[in-house]
Image (cartoon, rainbow, N blue to C red):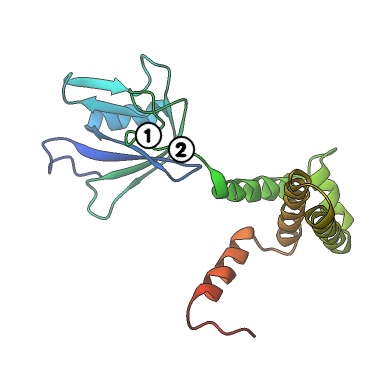
C-alpha cells in the first residue's frame, strides 16, 4: 500500500468502521510508523498529535480495535479501517465518538449467511445445518414451509413471543435453502429493492 503521507505533514486520516455493523466508530490520524505498527500487530495504532507519540487504542483501557481490513482511498491519503472493537470506543464510555449505539440489528443476517456458507463449505459432523444440506432440497423446502405454518399459527392463535421464535426459525431455514441453490439472503434484498422503485411492475 503506497500511502501519501506528505499532504498533511506526515499524517493520514484513518476512519474506523465496525466490520459487523458498518457503524463509523471514530476518526484518528496515523503517520508511517503508526500504520506499520497497526499492520504488524493487528491492533489499530494512531499518532497522537497532543502527546506527540504513537498511541495504540486500548493500551490503557483494554478496549482495543482488532483490525479486519485496511483500504486506501482513491487519492491514497485516507484510510478506511474495518475493525472488531473490544468494548466501547470513545473515552467517554460510549460505543462511538458520536455517542451512537453500535448495534448490529438487521445486518446480523449477513453474518448468519456467512456462518451458513461456512457450514456448507466445511460440512462438520453433528451440525444441524450440515444435516439439512445432506437431506437435500426437498427436505429443506419442507422445513421452510413447516416453520412458516408454525409462525402463522402463533400469529393467529398463539403468542407474539412464539411468533417471533417461529419466524426466526423460518428465516434460518430459508437462508439454508437459498444457500443450497447458490444464492444468498442479499439476493432477496436486491429483489425487494427493485420492487421498491416506482417503475417496478408485478410480473
The quarter in which the C terminus is drawn is: bottom right
Judged left or right of residue 102, residue 162 is right
Inter-mark Cα distance, 2 to 1: 7 Å
Q: Would residue 1 be visible to someone looking at this image?
A: no
The correct choice, above or below, for 180 with respect to 79 in the image is below
> Can you identify the residue that label 1 sits on?
96
Q: Secondary structure at mark 1?
A: loop
> Can you identify the residue that label 2 sits on?
102
Q: Where, by quadrant of the figure, is residue 201 drawn?
A: bottom right
* Residue at screen point 74% across, 58% down: 174
The correct choice, above or below, for 53 with respect to 22 in the image is above
In percent of width and height, residue 99 lies at 35, 34
Q: Do the residues bearing badges 2 and 1 touch, measured as CB atoms within 8 Å?
A: yes
In percent of width and height, residue 93 lies at 38, 23
* Residue at screen point 31% across, 30% down: 36
Q: Where, by quadrant of the figure, is residue 24 drawn?
A: top left
Judged left or right of residue 22, residue 181 is right
The quarter in which the N terminus is drawn is: top left
Judged left or right of residue 65, residue 26 is left
In percent of width and height, residue 200 lies at 53, 82
Amino acid at each position: 500500500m503506497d500511502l501519501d503521507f506528505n499532504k498533511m505533514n506526515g499524517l493520514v486520516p484513518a476512519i474506523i468502521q465496525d466490520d459487523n455493523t458498518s457503524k463509523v466508530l471514530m476518526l484518528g490520524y496515523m503517520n508511517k510508523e503508526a500504520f506499520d505498527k497497526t499492520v504488524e500487530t493487528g491492533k489499530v495504532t494512531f499518532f497522537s498529535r497532543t502527546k506527540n507519540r504513537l498511541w495504540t487504542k486500548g493500551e490503557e483501557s483494554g478496549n482495543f480495535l482488532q483490525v479486519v481490513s485496511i483500504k486506501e482511498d482513491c487519492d491514497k491519503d485516507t484510510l478506511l479501517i474495518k475493525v472488531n472493537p473490544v468494548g466501547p470506543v470513545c473515552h467517554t464510555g460510549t460505543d462511538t465518538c458520536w455517542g451512537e449505539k453500535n448495534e448490529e440489528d438487521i445486518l446480523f443476517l449477513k453474518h448468519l449467511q456467512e456462518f451458513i456458507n461456512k457450514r456448507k463449505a466445511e460440512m462438520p459432523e453433528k451440525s444441524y445445518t450440515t444435516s439439512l444440506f445432506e437431506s437435500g432440497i426437498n427436505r429443506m423446502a419442507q422445513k421452510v414451509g413447516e416453520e412458516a405454518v408454525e409462525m402463522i399459527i402463533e400469529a393467529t392463535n398463539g403468542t407474539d413471543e412464539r411468533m417471533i421464535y417461529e419466524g426466526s426459525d423460518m428465516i434460518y431455514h430459508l437462508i439454508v435453502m437459498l444457500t443450497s441453490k447458490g444464492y444468498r439472503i442479499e439476493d432477496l434484498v436486491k429483489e425487494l429493492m427493485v420492487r421498491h422503485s416506482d417503475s417496478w411492475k408485478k410480473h
